[in-house]
Amino acid sequence: MLSVLGSASLSAQTYDSLQLLKGHKAKVYYSTGNTDRAKQIAVRCDNVLAYYKPVFGFEPEVTLLILSPADWPTYSAKGAVYGMPHYSGSQTLIIAGQDNAFWQSQVPPINKLPQEFASKFQATYTNQDNKLTMQGFFDLLAIHELGHAYHNQAKVKMQRRWMGELFPNILLHTYIAEKEPALLPALTLFPKMMIMRDTAGLRYTSLEDFESKYNEIAQKSPGNYGWYQCKLHAAAAMIYDTGGKDIVAKLWNALKGKNEVLGDTEFIALLSDKADQSIADVQLKWSAIK
């Protein structure tokens, strides 16, 4: 998700201060006290990799780190706030091991939400301690980060910054819809809430801005960046609802082998003809995504 963050020297690091969890497709290391959480996340990653192997023809090499606040500065990418899942250029997927201030900061004032929406929000995001937390949403973003592992390791050109984020979101939404549909509310409700908000306080809202000012938005305006990501989550849901589970393979095959940068007209035609019109509509009808 935050591919612009400066990576720590993870490829040169050892994980001596972390615990090793054996028996999974990824190499899994975790901070002391996070055994159960590491097992849960590792199993989901196993399932995602198994689900998509027939689609992509390979499983990416991934090292999975589930970290405590104390270990986060040592192993996370430079500038990554504790709680934000991210994938580093050294094939490492980094996830927070516990609830945190970042997740809590995303919880909206319930009394300012429409009553029906507030009830759904509380039912979806209340944890076992009867506390509102966005952990249920942010945990699923690990699958988004696996999406980056696929296209980065296969060297498939995404053509646009927005496609580089939309593709992992489509992969995420499709997997949840097909294999863990009970988690769809946790995946979709938060993005819907975010894009319902008044955009007057956002400096950037157009897809053109996201494309041309991606680094600036991601590094200097995390709230604005999060709004864009939520729009792209909503777009992924729309695309899945239109094209079903086969949409991932269609988009992947459309993008493969296009190593040259396509112009807008060519790119829209490629998406419309080889993938699905709903994907082309992300560029054509950006403002209509809700």
Image (cartoon, grey):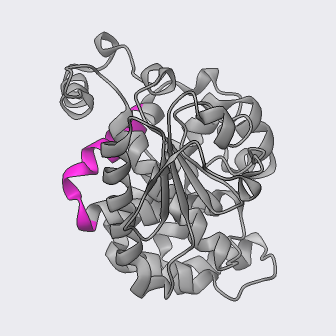
Residue 35, how many percent across, how many down? 35, 44
Give the residue at the far top of this rendering.
111
Q: What's the residue at 32%, 61% (across, down)?
A: 43
Along the line of sight, the residue nearer the viewer: 168 or 247: 168
**234 left or right of 128?**
right
* Residue 129: quarter of image: top left
The span picked out in magenta is 178-193
Q: What's the residue at 25%, 50% (across, down)?
A: 183
Q: Is residue 273 visible?
A: no
Residue 260, placed above or below residue 5? below
**262 left or right of 32?**
right
**The stretch drawn in magenta includes residue 135:** no
Along the line of sight, the residue nearer the viewer: 23 or 123: 23
Q: What's the residue at 74%, 52% (across, down)?
A: 211
Residue 170, how many percent across, how many down? 45, 63
Q: What's the residue at 41%, 65% (across, down)?
A: 239
**64 left or right of 237?**
right
**The stretch drawn in magenta includes residue 183:** yes
Q: How many marks?
A: 0
Residue 13, how many percent across, how many down? 71, 52
Q: Quadrant of the C terminus?
A: top left
**241 left or right of 231?**
left
Residue 52, placed above or below residue 161? below
* Residue 260: quarter of image: bottom right
